[in-house]
Image (cartoon, rainbow, N blue to C red):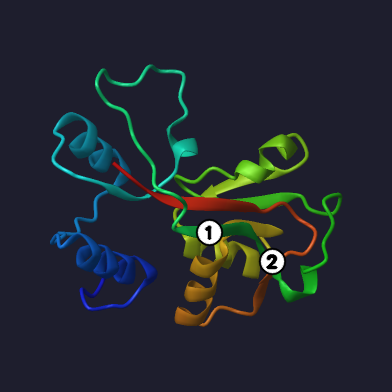
Amino acid sequence: FVTPDSVSLFSEFIEWLSKKTNCEFKILPLPIKRLNLVFEEQRAIDFIYPDNPNWHITSQPKKEGIRRVYSPSIAVALGGTMVTEANKNISLTQFKKLAIPRGFTPVAWLPLQSQVTFREVSDTKAALLMVLTGRVDGADIEYNVAQHLIKKHRLGPMVLANNLPFTLTDFHLST
C-alpha cells in the first residue's frame, strides 16, 4: 500500500476479481483492531484479505448475526525461523532464543516455550537485526517478508533454518 501502482499478488487478484464480477473495488488498509470494528460492528467493509479462520478462534462467543465465510485459499505464507548462514543447520537442542515481532504468535514454537526464550521486538526488521547481532539465535518471520527486508536494508545474509519449526498459513478472502 506504499505506492498505489505497485504490482503484487493482491493487486493482480483484485484486478482479476474486478473483471470477473464487473465490480469496482476500493482498497482500504486498516490496522487489525479497526478492521474488525469496521467489518463486524459498522459493517462498512464487504470483504477482508488476507484472512484465515484460525485467526478468529477465541473463547468469546461471536457477535450475533456475524458469520464469516471464507474463500478457498488464495495464497500460502511460509513462516519460519530466519538464522545466519552459519546456523542454517542449528538443532532444536542448540537453539535458545527466538525473536518475535510484536503482534505475531510463533504458532509452531508454542509447544517449545519451556525450552526456548521468546524475545518480543518492535517489528520484523528489529527481529532480523537481533539475529545478525547474535542477541537471539533466530527470528520467527514470514519468509518473503524477511527476504524483502534483507534486500531493502542490506542486512547480512540470512536463511531459513533447515531443522527448526515452520508454518504454512493459507490466506483467504472472507466476507
Q: Quadrant of the C terminus?
A: top left
Q: Quadrant of residue 65?
A: top left
Measured from the top left, where is residue 74 in percent x and y? 44, 58
Q: How far separated are the C-alphas under marks 2 and 1?
A: 18 Å
Left or right: 146 with respect to 113? Answer: left
Q: Count residues near mark 1 (Cα–Cα under 10 Å), then give few for <14, some for 14-19, many for 20+.
A: some
- Name the disc covering residue 77, or none: 1
What's the amino acid at mark 2?
Val
Element type at mark 1: strand
Q: State the residue at coordinates (20%, 45%).
A: 46
Q: Earlier in the sequence, mark 2 or mark 1?
A: 1
Q: State the residue at coordinates (51%, 51%).
A: 170
Q: Quadrant of the N terminus?
A: bottom left
Residue receiving disc 2: 83
Q: Count residues near mark 2 (Cα–Cα under 10 Å), then give few for <14, some for 14-19, many for 20+.
A: many
Left or right: 31 with respect to 165? Answer: left
Left or right: 51 with respect to 127? Answer: left
Measured from the top left, where is residue 41 in percent x and y? 18, 29
Task: Count the numbered circles shown.
Answer: 2
